[in-house]
Image (tube, rainbow, N blue to C red):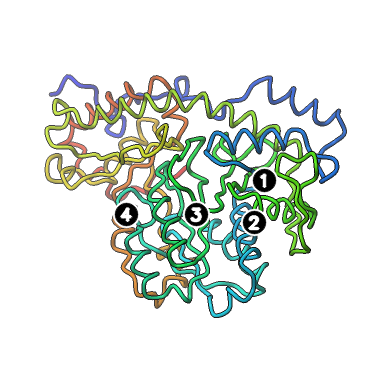
Amino acid sequence: MSTVALPAVLGGEPVITPDTDPVWPDTGAVESAILTEVTDGGQWVGYANHPAKWRAVLEQVVADTTGHRYGVGQPNGTLAIASGLRAQLFARGGAWARGRDQVLVADLTHASAHHGVTLGVAAQLDRAPRLVPIPAKPDATMDEEVTAAYLAEHADRVLAVVPATMYGNFGAIDRFAELGRRYDVVVHHDNALGGAARFDGPGAPTASLSGQGGGKAAPSCEGGLTLTDDPELAALLRADTDCGTGPGRLDPIPFAEVAGMMAGNQRMGEQPAALLLVQWLRALHARLRMRENRRLIRELIADPGLFPVPVLWNPPPDAEYPPFFALYLSCTDALEAELGLTPKDLRVTLAAEGVWAEAGFTPTHRDPAWKQWADGVPLSYETSARVVDRAVFVHTKFLRDPRFPDVMGEILRRVVAHRDRLRGVGDGRPEPVW
């Protein structure tokens, strides 16, 4: 019998116990103090002539660290998507939108993102768009080649393209931005899963993100931002969120007179702004630790002493710092060929060891609430289905823990040593879901 410890799913002691489970979310006295200051200060929200202090600081810190000039606070990431699309559509005008009814969206993303797309277009154009879900690449991001081919044939029907950062992978945001310019369509970057990473390539005209702490929610609400480099779009975003009033003369966004527009009334209050600012600063600190952990795990899964043939793959980092919202691993065909295990066997084994590991988001074409969007669209979803089936999506709290590379090393050694007994362990068991 192997001297390597028995996997927990076979009755061994788990690697991670309640006593060693990483703390989540990170909280401390700063959150309590900042809430007290905001509450006692009496200004819980900002207006053009009375700018909100904490919202302004948050907007500038997040914009600068993600590579944008301007940020506009939002109640959550879904409404941030809606506001970004609404501002771009407003700037282009109704004549441009005539005859266009489609928005190309990422097939692998949360349904709330599609809801934000529908809200943004419907509020501005008084009609809901036709969503066209674009299949994913192996790194789970929207396929830019499929998008380019679709636009080459149908650009005159397309309002917008909304690529999403998935599992910390940016994908080809610069290529989508170029396609938007070439085919004269709106491009909005849904960056909710980008963490506090910076994308240094040419970006979309607007981008959006959501809270970065306990999951995606701030302690008092979620919170989000819409980001842009364009001062005119920034002024429209401020007017959209502040009931039609554009930036004031003390606002971080340059002052500009804004014509009347459909206002979303989506002001971000000072409490969630201050809490999200603290979360963001914690995330910036964690980014360094997670960058190193991701490097060590990339070395681990490529170590021929552990896997003579690689059975796991991690997309290469494509930012100044590796995007880090979570650890995304994809099982190669060698997992079955060399170890005789399925991706579900591996996910069930990791879950039993105390690691939050699941397949990830359901593709749009499999989600009962959104399946109708894929019906009749002449695109193949085989790649997206394979991405979900073979994914090992590990929660960010583990990647932030300095012990995690050692934890993964121990678990994977158990998997290799006891592969014969682990074969089929996922059969008849539900997928791990947290």
Kindly state the secondary structure of the residue where label 1 is placed.
strand
- Give the labeled residue for mark 3: 110
Q: Earlier in the sequence, mark 1 or mark 2?
A: 1
Q: Which residue is pictured at 58% across the width and 44% down the height?
A: 210
Q: What residue type is labelled 1?
A: Val
Kindly state the secondary structure of the residue where label 4 is placed.
loop
- Give the labeled residue for mark 1: 72
Closest to the observer, 337 or 136? 136
Q: Which of marks 2 and 4 is nearer the N terminus?
A: 2
Residue 129, located in which quarter of the rendered image? bottom right
Q: Badge 1, how many Cα within 10 Å: few under 14, some, many 20+?
A: many
Could you tell me residue 156's position as x and y percent?
47, 76
Residues at discs 1 and 2 in contact (Cβ within 8 Å): yes
Query: For the residues marked 3 and 4, what is the alpha-carbon distance in whole angstroms?
Result: 16 Å
Query: For the residues marked 3 and 1, what is the alpha-carbon distance in whole angstroms?
Result: 22 Å
Could you tell me residue 161's position as x and y percent?
48, 62
Kindly state the secondary structure of the residue where label 3 is placed.
loop
- Give the labeled residue for mark 2: 83
Q: Badge 4, how many Cα within 10 Å: few under 14, some, many 20+?
A: some
Kindly state the secondary structure of the residue where label 2 is placed.
helix
